[in-house]
Image (cartoon, helix red, strand yellow):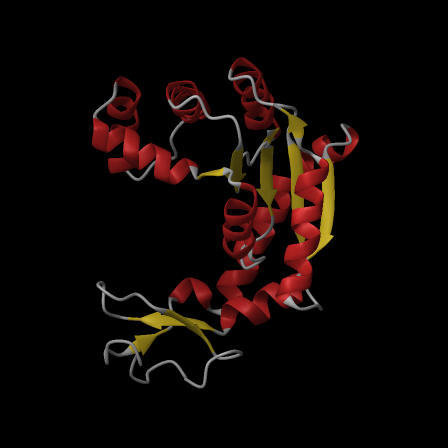
Amino acid sequence: MDKYNLILLGPPGAGKGTHAASLVRELGVTHLSTGDMLRAAVAEDTELGQEARGYMEAGELVPDELVIGIVRERLLRDKLSSVLFDGFPRTVAQAEALEQVAAEAGLPEARVIYLDVSDQEVVARLSGRFQCRSSSCNRIYNVRNDNLRPGEQCPACGSETYQREDDQPEAIRRRLAVYREQTAPLIDYYRRREQLTEIKAEGDRVEAITARVLAAAREGAAQG
């Protein structure tokens, strides 16, 4: 049976969620989100979860060593043999720590898939995004794909729709600048180690991009 250790990277709006869902469905990998794992550790009141709770309640970033500890705990506890990390690691230090934890858990060398999308396309995608104001619905729409505009009624529940402040063009550009600055060294790190596959994630049908993502993932499979 093939084993996978996949890392999916890309700027906001690159389509990571869409392609992650395809990888889970087609390859049977376990989708690991560090945010979800942190919240689960807090809810389960584990020792590491208790430590993380203080940072999260204060609105502070959880230190790398705690995040890595929670990842390690999950990998070893559930004996996961095929995983997909979505948007993590974010720094070279996190990548080095994750490599050690993955080796301890018996995972193969990571295959990193970078979804390359231009700033112009990201701004166009995200600035067209808006959502339902109802917390029980939260349906997300986009003016590029849906026959709807912010402020109109949500077709799903009838509540008002609105656009978040961080989906305004200037806010998106600021987020992108921070993302590029933080992740450029990480992309170079994986490129030098020949673990990186870069995929142009715009200008083509979603299905075609997904096919390239799946092909790249399968190239990184290890026999179990």
Q: Quadrant of residue 132?
A: bottom left
Q: Looking at this rendering, what residue extends furthest in the top direction?
A: 104
Q: Position of residue 152 (x, y in %)?
A: 32, 85
Would you say 135 lies left or right of 197 here? left
Examine the rendering and report whether any part of residue 36 can be seen.
yes
Q: Nearer the viewer, residue 45 or 84?
A: 84
Q: Relative to 46, say whether 160 is above or below.
A: below
Q: Position of residue 190 (x, y in %)?
A: 71, 32
Q: Position of residue 57 (x, y in %)?
A: 24, 37
Q: Looking at this rendering, what residue extends furthest in the front direction?
A: 1
Would you say 208 lies left or right of 101 here? right
Quadrant in the picture for the C terminus: top right
Q: Relative to 211, say whether 189 is above or below.
A: above
Q: Residue at horizontal 68%, vertical 40%?
A: 218
Quadrant in the picture for the N terminus: top right
Examine the rendering and report whether any part of residue 117 can be seen.
no
Q: Residue at horizontal 63%, vertical 63%?
A: 207
Q: Quadrant of residue 75?
A: top left
Q: Nearer the viewer, residue 150 or 83?
A: 83
Q: Residue at horizontal 21%, vertical 25%?
A: 45
Q: How many marks?
A: 0
